[in-house]
């Protein structure tokens, strides 16, 4: 039998074993409820564990409650530590609630993460995916977890209709979350918690409109059943289509998710099944500056202009599922298991302008791509607590793994057709002449296997006023690359590492926690350059091994009931490829030093705030021949702050004004720091009105994003080539929601 057949059998056996474990955990209780059971079982929800050589759910299962004002929760999922209150852990974590998502009429994950100054939102190179930078380092859609499990969600765009909560963990996280499939996340991680049925029945019907003629409808229904509401079902369906505020761009989006859960005295289980499909016609892509000869960044075109060819089209479809179970063996020990995965089909015909000069002259190539992928992730573990004299212990032991396979084929023409970003030409579709693989049946081009074992102990001293966390993860990574035409394996890389975590929390008062941590990140190594670029290179096209990034952080958090927030100082060091003595290796480094500030809550009756600021020094060190030593890393702004809030207008019952102001500092496009993007501002304003409607409520929401219709380059990206992402034009959003 060939290796593929063996792998399939092994995956099936693993799946069968883990399904048996998960189902066994839902057996009737044998003894009294255990310590891991939430005291209020009516409020407990079931959240999934992290996988992919990564996350193991540990301390808690129930997400922290919404903070005063309802916009955020002061805490979230921290991989192996599970759902945690931010005041109890030596890490920086915050969650955005479904209430905030709904009130801001957020459409995608990027819309939600715009609320945090530590996150930059951009687009992937050559497609319509959202990509992010957290603390100045890349985080791709492949590496967003769902209920703690990597490899489940769609990888390009994620619709908010499936989001119960968005949890942002800031900082390196190899121990907490493991190595994600895409190999990003050095500066932070994002987890999306599924929607769950609440004790009160949920029935919401929404309809909405966005500039220029995009309409959507959404149904969200949740019910609980049983004598103690132990069975729950939550279903969300969203459908939208129409033209966007960008000229000649249209979209069709469909999303459907069903979540089933059981919460017994000792056993808990959940099953989530989802489907998402997006079709983008004439979508505006990034601007490429790889051949640019100007001395300054090109002037920004009109905010609503579209300089990519009208034939640009992308179809993105993902089906996904995850299953999880937990069982309390005693009052102090809980076992858990989780499995999940997805199947993705993508097809795109794309061409983005490669700008030549500051007059906007450009060329457009053409690329037709077929992409298919499968992922399978699994995890099993044990968590518990014990005491040794005056010291308490919270112990976590677990194993996790992820397997991913991708099939890719493409055909294109790389002779550029002339156009101009200020006066776009009507570029026709041309006959491609550079095939790789079969577009109707793509060949496997990559397989990745990640496995990891973790062990941690959080020791509590002085009645848990001092919490010391110590742990380590043994991680194995195997990467196989295959020729897209022949299917033969071209290269294989396998390596293992141990990553530690050290953290301490000192609860100075009931309202203030001081903390510090050292934690690391792991990534799959890049490939050395080819001889065509460096003729004297001794190791061309060699996979350069696992990359280990290190973070040190100190900070303080405060919680006064109605106002919370914190300050943190961090340094992250990520190795970078540079060439020494004609040999490529991780000799260089990007060192990001920063300060983060945050505040949220209800400072005055009827006023809710959500604010954050980040100041960053992203320095390049030990670059090839010292050419760029001391320069700023590209795509990382020197500062960014976000000030948002809501105001219940006096003497006008149920009417609320909303607003958000974003300011982003300058950033460089290239390592040599020759091209700099100007700072930019964006102002979003809106109103919300709740109107009684018999036994129901009718909620009207009206918002305008980018009120002043600013023309600005939102972000600079260096993935593949030097590119610019233009900010969205002024967009009107109107919706009506009936809640029964």
Image (cartoon, rainbow, N blue to C red):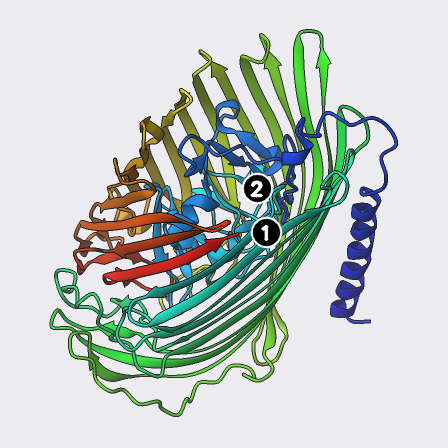
Give coordinates of residue 710: x percent, y percent: 17, 58
- The residue most toward the bottom is 431
The quarter holding residue 444 reads bottom right
User: Of residues 348 and 630, which is closer to you in this image?
Assistant: 348
User: Of residues 706 and 355, which is closer to you in this image?
Assistant: 706
Q: What residue did someone put label 2 on? A: 177
Left or right of 586? Residue 657 is left
User: Of residues 596 and 527, which is closer to you in this image?
Assistant: 596
Q: Residues within 10 Å of mark 2 (few under 14, many from 20)?
A: many
**In the image, is residue 272 above or below residue 94?**
below
Q: What residue did someone put label 1 on? A: 150
Left or right of 539? Residue 226 is right
The quarter holding residue 458 reads top right
Residue at image point 76% right, 65% down: 8
The quarter holding residue 441 reads bottom right
- The residue most toward the right is 30
Q: Earlier in the sequence, mark 2 or mark 1?
A: 1
Is disc 2 in contact with disc 1, using a CB cutoff of under 8 Å? yes
Q: Residues within 10 Å of mark 1 (few under 14, many from 20)?
A: many
Residue at image point 61% right, 51% down: 222
Observer able to see residue 726: no
């Amino acid at each position: 039998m060939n290796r593929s057949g063996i792998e399939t059998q092994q995956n099936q056996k693993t799946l069968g074993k883990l399904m048996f474990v998960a189902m066994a955990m839902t057996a009737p209780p044998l003894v009294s409820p255990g310590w891991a059971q939430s005291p209020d079982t009516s409020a407990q929800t079931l959240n999934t564990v992290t996988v992919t050589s990564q996350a193991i759910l540990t301390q808690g299962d129930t997400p922290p409650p919404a903070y005063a004002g309802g916009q955020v929760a002061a805490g979230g999922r921290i991989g192996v530590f599970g759902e945690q209150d931010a005041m109890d852990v030596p890490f920086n974590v915050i969650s955005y609630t479904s209430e905030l998502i709904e009130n801001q009429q957020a459409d995608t994950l990027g819309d939600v993460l715009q609320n945090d100054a530590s996150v930059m939102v951009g687009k992937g190179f050559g497609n319509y995916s959202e990509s992010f930078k957290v603390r100045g380092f890349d985080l791709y859609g492949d590496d967003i977890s769902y209920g703690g499990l990597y490899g489940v969600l769609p990888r390009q765009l994620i619709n908010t209709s499936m989001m119960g909560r968005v949890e942002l963990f800031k900082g390196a996280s190899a121990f907490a979350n493991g190595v994600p499939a895409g190999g990003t996340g050095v500066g932070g991680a994002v987890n999306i918690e599924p929607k769950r049925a609440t004790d009160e029945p949920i029935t919401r019907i929404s309809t909405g409109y966005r500039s220029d003629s995009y309409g959507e409808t959404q149904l969200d229904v949740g019910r609980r059943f049983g004598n103690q509401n132990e069975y729950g079902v939550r279903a969300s369906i969203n459908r939208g289509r129409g033209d966007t505020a960008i000229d000649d761009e249209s979209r069709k989006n469909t999303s459907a998710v069903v979540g089933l859960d059981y919460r017994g005295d000792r056993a808990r289980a959940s099953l989530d099944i989802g489907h998402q499909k997006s079709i983008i016609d004439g979508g505006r892509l990034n601007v490429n500056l790889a051949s640019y000869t100007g001395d300054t960044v090109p002037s920004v075109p009109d905010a609503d202009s579209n300089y990519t060819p009208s034939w640009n089209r992308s179809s993105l479809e993902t089906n996904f599922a995850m299953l999880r179970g937990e069982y309390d063996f005693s009052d102090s020990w809980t076992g858990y298991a989780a499995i999940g995965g997805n199947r993705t089909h993508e097809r795109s015909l794309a061409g983005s302008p490669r700008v030549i000069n500051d007059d906007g002259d450009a060329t457009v190539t053409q690329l037709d791509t077929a992409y298919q992928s499968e992922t399978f992730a699994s995890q099993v573990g044990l968590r518990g607590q014990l005491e040794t004299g005056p010291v308490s212990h919270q112990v976590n032991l677990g194993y996790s793994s992820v397997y991913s396979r991708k099939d890719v084929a493409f055909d294109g023409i790389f002779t550029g057709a002339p156009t101009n970003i200020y006066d776009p030409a009507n570029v026709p579709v041309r006959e491609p002449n550079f095939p790789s693989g079969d577009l109707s049946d793509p060949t496997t081009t990559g397989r990745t296997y990640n496995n990891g074992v973790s062990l941690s102990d959080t020791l509590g001293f002085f009645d848990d006023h001092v919490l010391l966390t110590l742990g380590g993860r043994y991680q194995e990574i195997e990467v196989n690359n295959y020729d897209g035409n022949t299917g033969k394996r071209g290269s294989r890389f396998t390596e293992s590492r141990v990553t530690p975590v050290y953290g301490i929390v000192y609860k100075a008062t009931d309202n203030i926690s001081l903390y510090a941590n050292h934690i690391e990140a792991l990534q799959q190594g890049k490939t050395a350059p080819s001889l065509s670029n460096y003729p004297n290179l001794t190791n061309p096209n060699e996979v350069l091994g696992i990359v280990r990034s290190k973070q040190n952080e100190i900070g303080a958090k405060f919680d006064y009931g109605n106002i919370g927030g914190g300050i943190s100082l961090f340094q992250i060091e990520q190795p970078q490829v540079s060439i020494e003595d004609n040999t490529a290796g991780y000799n260089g480094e990007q060192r990001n030093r920063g300060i983060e500030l945050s505040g949220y809550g209800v400072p005055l009756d009827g006023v809710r705030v959500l604010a954050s600021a980040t100041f960053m020094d992203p320095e390049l060190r030990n670059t090839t021949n010292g050419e760029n030593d001391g320069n700023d890393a590209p795509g990382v702004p020197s500062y960014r702050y976000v000030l948002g809030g809501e105001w219940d207008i006096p003497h006008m019952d149920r009417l609320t004004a909303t607003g958000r102001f974003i300011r982003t500092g300058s950033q460089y496009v290239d390592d040599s720091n020759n091209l700099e993007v100007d700072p930019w501002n964006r102002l979003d304003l809106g109103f919300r009105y709740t109107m009684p409607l018999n036994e129901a409520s009718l909620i009207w929401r009206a918002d305008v994003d980018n009120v002043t219709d600013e023309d600005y380059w939102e972000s600079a990206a260096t993935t593949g080539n030097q590119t610019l992402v233009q900010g969205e034009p002024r967009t009107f959003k109107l919706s009506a929601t009936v809640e029964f």
